[in-house]
Image (spheres, rainbow, N blue to C red):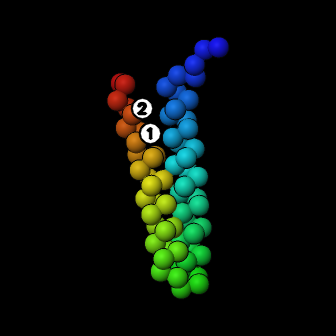
Amino acid sequence: MTGYGENFNLMKMKLIGFGSIIIGFLVAASGYRYGSFGIGLAGVVLLIIGIAFIVGHVLRRNERR
């Protein structure tokens, strides 16, 4: 069986990035709604992690050109 290659890893990074952005936004909104600073901060951290994955995906994709 052949390996998936680099494209599979880039797709995985994109899906993890978008997933953590969505979950981070929902957690941050929930923290804001209930007035919990810790939950809101956790949501913002997830948002930042998701953005970092997307930026890493774009940079690695453009690196090959």
Residue under pointer 1 = 57
Q: Residue at x 65, y 14 (%)?
A: 1
Q: Do the numbered discs 2 and 1 sit on residues whose CB atoms are within 8 Å?
A: yes
Question: Where is 15 relative to 1, above or below?
Answer: below
Residue 14 vertical position relative to residue 9 in the rendered view, above or below: below
Quick one: SS at disc 1? helix
What residue is at 40 percent from the left and 45 percent from the top?
55
Q: Which mark is residue 61?
A: 2
Residue plotted at (54% across, 63% down) = 24
Question: Hey, which residue is sitting farthest right in the picture?
Answer: 1
x then y, percent, for residue 52: 41, 50
Total marks drawn?
2
- Please provide percent x and percent y for residue 31: 55, 77
Does residue 55 appear to the left or right of 33 in the view shown? Answer: left
Q: Which residue is found at the position 48% from the left and 60% from the top? A: 47
Q: Is residue 65 left or right of residue 33?
A: left
Residue found at the far top of this picture: 1
Q: Amino acid at mark 2?
A: Arg
Which residue type carries mark 1? His
